[in-house]
Image (cartoon, rainbow, N blue to C red):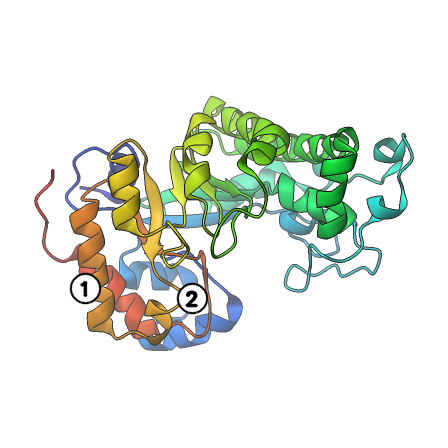
Amino acid sequence: MDKRTRFHRTIERQEVDRPACWLGLPVPAAEPALFQHFGVGDARALRAAIDDDVVPIEVPYHDGKANHIAVAFDFALDRVNDAQERTLTARGWFSEHPEDDAVERFAWPDPARHLDPAACRAAVAAAEPDRAALGVLWSCHFQDACAAFGMEEALMVMKTEPERFKAVIDRITRFYLDANRIFLEATRGRLDAVLIGNDFGSQTGLMLRRAEIESFVLPGTRALIAQAHSHGVKVLHHSCGAVCDLIDPLTACGADAIHPIQARATGMDAARLRERFGGSVSFCGGVDAQFLLVNGTPDEVASEVGRLRELFPTGLVISPSHEAILPDIAPANIAALFQATASGNLAFR
């Protein structure tokens, strides 16, 4: 079975020779050890060495500052235009601008100025054609709304001035719809799926009530997913933390798979998810990156992958439980993850 077919059939919960498997997104500091371990010189060769089923494609957003669509807005009053150093808790521009016309007065970036369709096409053309192409859109409209005020202030405004919060998050959503339209139209027919998301969970539960997420955030999520589907691609929705209570609402919004199953978070063990949702929801992730991939042995990693395959012979793209592969993850454990996914064919059921 070829990689793209395996990826689609895994998410569609159809029979596969083995589940699809995705490395995730190694941070730059993690790459030297991975390259050395696998004897390669770049990310493309690494994907070949581990036999990754997925190739991630970042949105080529260039604004002359951070040059990353996840930090497109100059909200922070103490500015840090750096994707690695940004924070949601710093004071944001809207915390000092309660005026009725504040949304109109903020200097919103125009994605058409910073996102070149030709660069989008080039990014996809450079990807390996035999792997499932995953556009990494992020589109974190909730997290950006928190940054717009500073997170504590944002959540207070959500409670005390809901229309003010809604005006900001809706305008952020509009930015992402505009940006994503450029990327999706430029790459139409070349992508298999996109990754979007917001972190809603802590280690033990949701950071705010489910009803508030459904009221303020999910309308934008639904629009973003519908837009992606209209361009013929699947949607993986990311949220770190204990988000079991949001899985049904997210799938109701149209998400094709929930990422990343933060395995050690409350209620997120794969066996519990299988018991609660049966075969009605697809997932991506599940291999614990908080403890197992950091402190475990390759044999322990392989054993856990075997457990996941028993629980989800399909419907789970096997991947670390955090998309960012950090330097503390042993490359030998990444090798074990992929080898255990590829070895043998567990009976489909």
**Left/right of residue 312 with respect to residue 167 in the rendered view:** left
**What percent of the width, then of the height, locates residue 197?**
53, 42
Placement of the C terminus among the 4 image quadrants: top left
Judge by depth and name the residue closer to the eye, 119 or 7: 7
Placement of the N terminus among the 4 image quadrants: top left
Q: Is 77 placed above or below 171 here?
A: below
Query: Is residue 310 among what the camera can see?
Result: yes
Identified by mark 1, the residue type is Ser
Q: Which of the 4 image quadrants contains residue 212? A: top right
Please give the name of the residue rendered at 54% of the width and 48% of the height, measured from the top-left corner: 199
Identified by mark 2, the residue type is Asp
Q: Which residue is mark 1?
A: 303
**What percent of the width, then of the height, locates residue 71?**
68, 51
Please give the name of the residue rendered at 22% of the width and 52% of the height, measured from the top-left corner: 308
Please give the name of the residue rendered at 69% of the width and 59% of the height, measured from the top-left corner: 86
**Left/right of residue 83 with respect to residue 254 in the rendered view:** right
- Local SS, label 1: helix
Q: Is 230 placed above or below 180 here?
A: above
**What percent of the width, then of the height, locates residue 141?**
64, 39
Q: Earlier in the sequence, mark 2 or mark 1?
A: 2
Q: Which residue is mark 2?
A: 42
**What percent of the width, then of the height, locates residue 39?**
32, 74
Q: CA distance from mark 2 to mark 1?
A: 29 Å
